[in-house]
Amino acid sequence: MAEEEGKAVRFGPYVLTGRLGEGGMCHVFRAYREETGEEVALKLLKEDQRQDEKVVDLFVTEADLSLMLRHPNLIRTLDAGAHNERHYIAMEIIEGANLREIEVQCQRIGVPMPPDFALYFVREMLEGLGALHDAAARSGRPLGLVHRDVTPSNVFVAWDGRVVVGDFGIAHIMAYGDADPGQAVGKVGYLSPEVVLGVGLDRRSDLFAVGIILWELLTGERLFKRDRDDDAMLAIADAIVPRPRKLKPGMHRGLEEVVLKSLARKRAERYQDAQEMIAALDPFWSQEIGHPIAIQSFLAGLFRDEVARFRTRRTNPPPRAKPKSGNYEPITLGPLPDDP
């Protein structure tokens, strides 16, 4: 993943050492906790979002949910809070690439995605989503969590082959009705028919998004990519899904049927939970091929420079610069974007 390096900047208990990326609401920095030296990915709410109560509430909800969730296939949140009224979430750093970056790199250098790798990625995603869907409060009450933003950009693959689902910023808590379930939030190309039509959502809406990702990984094409969002939403509402074997004739017919069932227009005709979909995929997945060690080699070939830098940093970590005193004072790292 892209990263900018610079001098250190102190932010509360953390020291920021480089940029990792940004989203609509947040910037993400490489940082470490000054007291312990533990390295983290620090997610900070953007300055221009701080006055928007709805955005702040979403961010705080994401922090609360993230701290509750513990599963190898869900990104781990270590700390959350606010410093000088600026909210943050400290997460584990995933040294690797997201699925979208992997897809793009495969296309750029002309390397097809091995089907067993695609099934491994999707299977691990489903394990994480299953844990999210089944999460319960301390009382044991099911939370009814729905991720609502399952996209290739939110699925991370570490250089060692581990797969994690991240970004719970718009997750819906059905137990408390924290959001309008019919509101079409998320990335247009990965919405489900029921969300597009505004008739509600549940865990099967996430599984529809997984089906889209599976279709795309196996075919190397985008399923609902259109020039206009309205056209994409119409295609999703009607669940217009070309048979994968038209693009990949060598695909097993049974696997094609699994893909198509996951993309059924009616929720009752899809897989009803993550474990049911995993069981349907398992007969077509070779554990000897779709294995973390093989994934490591595959990623090392796709991202030679990035993996080389990671290995160098791991074996010879650079000395940590002494952080500048004060709260996110601008240095060569740059001011935290949008700060005065």
Image: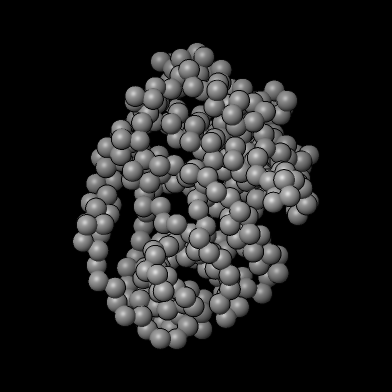
Tell me which residue sits at (54%, 27%) in the image. Answer: 278
Which colour scheme appears in the figure?
Answer: one colour
Q: Tell me, yes or no, if residue 332 can be seen here.
A: no
Question: What number of labels is visible?
Answer: 0
Residue closer to the observer: 105 or 144: 144
Residue 291 position, x and y percent, is 36, 31
State the residue lying farthest toward the top.
253
Residue closer to the observer: 322 or 104: 322
Tell whether 108 sits left or right of 263.
Answer: left
Q: Quadrant of residue 198?
A: top right
Residue 30 position, x and y percent, is 40, 65
Q: Is residue 294 above or below residue 318?
A: above
Residue 14 position, x and y percent, is 44, 73
Tell whether 177 sits left or right of 146.
Answer: right
State the residue lying farthest toward the front.
139
Quadrant including the N terminus: bottom left
Tell me which residue sits at (60%, 60%) in the image. Answer: 63
Tell me which residue sits at (71%, 39%) in the image. Answer: 202
State the residue lying farthest toward the bottom.
326
Residue closer to the observer: 12 or 49: 12
